[in-house]
Image: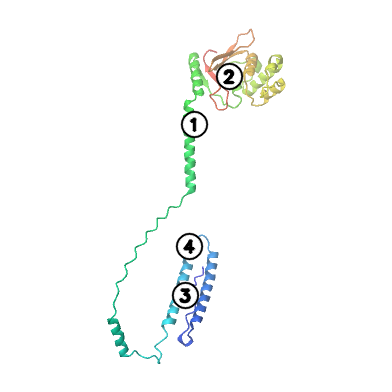
Amino acid sequence: MDTTTASSAPPAPTAAGAETLDELHARHRREKKDLQGRITNKKKNASKKTRRGVNDECAAMERDLAERQALELGALHGGGGSRADGESEVEEDGVDAVADGLAGTTIAPAPAPAPNPAPAPAAQPKRNRQKERLARRAAEQEALVASAAAEASTMTDHRGAERKALAATLATHGLTEHEIPPDGHCLFSAVADQLITRLIAPKALNGARATAGLLRNVAADYMLAHAETFAPFVTAEDGEPTGLEAYVERIRNTAEWGGQLELQALAEACEAEIVVVRREGEHVIKPKTENEVRRLWLAYYVHGFGLGEHYNSLRGGKA
């Protein structure tokens, strides 16, 4: 950092080489111009951390230069030595005349002081518009939350009503609910859990342990083998009829949700009676067989899970 200040400028010439008033003014202008150039250079090279110190230093330089130049001007005007030899002294009679004139002078009273001006109004604090916007936004959000809560309080709690109805049926049959992940395979996973926990080994599984993937294949194979039964009820997502083979391919190889058609196919293929406990009551799907059948229990939710329809496995009760 440049530590040179305005006070380092050359001092005024001595009496032997005294400056005239014009020369003094010219030198003062040069000094101010030179100082302004150095101040500009300092501020240009200042960083964010040093800016405040540089500003203080520049102000001190300007102040020092102004004080020194004022002293030089004062010295030039008031330091010119004694009076010239040709200057006459004041005569005694002149002094007496002045004294006599002052004795007859009447001193007028001083004028009344002017009234104090009215105080300027206090400056208003600067508005923080960003803070005001944030406050308005927070108030709007609070109003929306309050409105949603008020609306929700008047709506029917379908999820609560559904769970309450299913809980009553489960208590009647001595059933307990086993949660199945809501991953698109819930129907097949719930049936697999029933077959495993109730020790049911359908011939269609060929001795293999029941899994969601295996039961998807069992249902797909049965539907293809009985196309005349299932084809009329197969539709696309838009409700239009679609080919049974394309539909079965999705059931076999994707996470396509299973429904009434798949439950019917599994009941037939596994020779098992499937009881679906719903809010409206119990829905029983019976296979067309003369053989003795076992009973599988499923819970069906429409509102209980955020993704839509869902099946859980129900353990206990009468198999």
Q: Amino acid at mark 2?
A: Ile
Select label 2 or label 4 by which is in front.
4
- Observer able to see residue 50: no
Q: Nearer the viewer, residue 85 or 184?
A: 85
| Lateral position of residue 260 relative to residue 108, left or right | right
Q: Which amino acid type is shown beneath numbered disc 1?
A: Ala
Distance between the alpha carbons at the discs numbered 1 and 3: 74 Å
Which tag is nearer the camera, tag 1 or tag 4? 1
- Circle 2 residue: 196
CA–CA distance in space, label 2 to label 4: 79 Å
- The colour scheme is rainbow
Q: Earlier in the sequence, mark 3 or mark 2?
A: 3
Question: Is tag 1's residue or tag 2's residue first in the polypeptide sequence?
Answer: 1
Q: Secondary structure at mark 1?
A: helix
Q: Which residue is mark 1?
A: 148
Q: Write the residue at 55% across / 65% down.
A: 44
The residue depicted at 49 percent of the width and 35 percent of the height is: 144
Query: Residue 52 got which mark?
Result: 4
- Going from N to C along the chain, the mark reached first, 1 or 4, is 4
Residue 145 x %, y %? 48, 34
User: Looking at the image, is mark 1 or mark 3 nearer the viewer?
Assistant: 1
Secondary structure of residue under mark 2: helix
Q: Amino acid at mark 4?
A: Arg
